[in-house]
Structures are given as C-alpha cells and as structure tokens.
Amino acid sequence: MAIKTVNPETQRIKLERKERVILEAARAVFVEHGFDGARMQEIARRAGIGEGTIYSYYESKAELMLSVLQQFWDGLTLEAEGVMASVQAPDFFGGLRALAQYHLNTVILNSDFINLTFALRRNNSEVSVSRDHLRHYVAVFDRLFLRGQDRGELRADAILWQARDVFYGSLEYSARSIEMTMEAERSAREQGPVVEDMVALFRSHYGAVQTTEAGDHATVELLSSKLDQLSEKFDALAKRLS
C-alpha cells in the first residue's frame, strides 16, 4: 500500500493562508466590538473554521490581538519603505511629499483600527503593540530626515524628534478632520492641500539657509561700490547744474 506524502512546502503555505484568514477576521471583529467585546467564537465563524482551530495558532485572545497589531504595523512599514523606494525625485522634499501622502491616506482608511491601537496603549493593555513595531514605522521618516541633513538640504541644528512629532502629529489631526467631513453636508476637505502645506512648512522651517558663495559676495560688493561712485557723480553733477 502506497503511503501518501505531504509536501512540507505545500503544508506550510496552507497553514500561512489559514493564519492570514484568521488575522483578517480577528481584525474586523476587534474593530467592531473592541478587544473586550470580541469573542473567539465570532472570529472563528467569520474565518470559516472551528474555534478550536484558532487556539491551535494562538493560545489566547490577547495573543491573537497582539499578532493582529504586529501584522498591521509591520505591513505599514513595508508599504512606507516601498513608497520611499519608488519616489522619482531624490531630494528630501520629494520624499517628504510622498511619505506625507501615504501616511495621511493610510490613517484615513484605517482610522478605526489605529484608534483601537492607541486606545490599547493608553489603557496599558497587555496586548498593546510594542514600541519596536511603532518605532520601525516612524523610522522611515527618521531616515529620510537624517539623509536630508547629511545632504545639506535641512538645517544641521534641526532636532529630529521635534520634526517627527510635527510631521505625524499634524497629519493625524488633519486625517481626523478630513474623515469627519466625508459624510457631512459641508464640503469635504481634500488631502492634497494638507500635504503641500506640510511640505511648505518643512521647507520654510527646516530647510537649510542658502548661503551666498564667496564669488557672489564679491560681485555684490563690486556693484555696491559702483553704485556709490555713480551716486557721488550724480550729486556733483547736480551741484554744477544748480
């Protein structure tokens, strides 16, 4: 009797696919009911599996929630890095514009889940996403900013953490404002002007002061001297004509 063998690679792919289905179902249930109100039975129903199957992947609801959080923030980091890699303009402000657009749109589309994430952090929950996952995400901005300083595009004395807070804090507040107008009678706020205002703010406040080259200084001084001479000649001519 022939023994049927299972390809380990095929088995791994099936397990990973099932885990993705569980995480997607769990995220939807957590957003709708919050962590405390979510039930493993409902998550299993939406995933189309038995409740016991979930426990073969995750020992508890807390462990499942933590995996959902980690998957979400790690996914955002990979997407943000992809956005940076695809930017055509190599300068800091071109990269800033692309990252600002990505972050603003992402916060709007995922506002419910992001709100849940930070609610868990505020409540010191056992399932709060670790600082490492958030740090990896915001590090995309950090690398962009530090590279801008190295290239002389930004002020050398600019403080990174302050710039980071301005960037993420302003965009997240704007995202909430935009989201509030989406189903309101008043005109919806647009993302484009928010992004351009952010770029303009960084350009005016953090942009490196353009120093005049030595040759330009000499040219200015020469022109100033000639203007003084012409002024003296005009004064002398005016006295003779008076």
Image (cartoon, grey):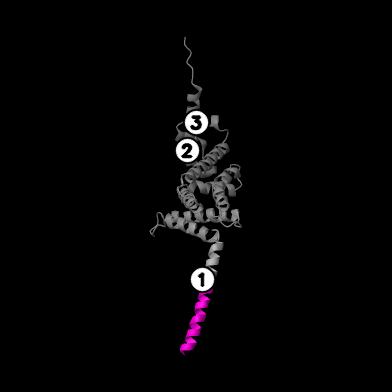
Disc 1 element: helix
Identify the residue position indicated by label 1 in the image: 223
**Going by the picture, which residue comes out furthest to the bottom?**
242
Inspect the image, locate mark 2, and give the three-letter code of the amino acid beneath it: Glu
Stretch in magenta:
222-242
Identify the residue position indicated by label 3 in the image: 16
**Which quarter of the figure has residue 217?**
bottom right
Inspect the image, locate mark 3, and give the three-letter code of the amino acid beneath it: Glu
Label 1 – label 3 distance at C-alpha: 73 Å
Inspect the image, locate mark 1, and give the three-letter code of the amino acid beneath it: Leu
Location of residue 14 in the rendering, given as x and y in whole percent from the top left corner: 47, 27
**Mark nearer the viewer, 3 or 2:** 3
Location of residue 106 in the rendering, given as x and y in whole percent from the top left corner: 47, 48
Label 3 – label 2 distance at C-alpha: 12 Å
Disc 2 element: helix
Circles 1 and 3: CB atoms closer than 8 Å: no
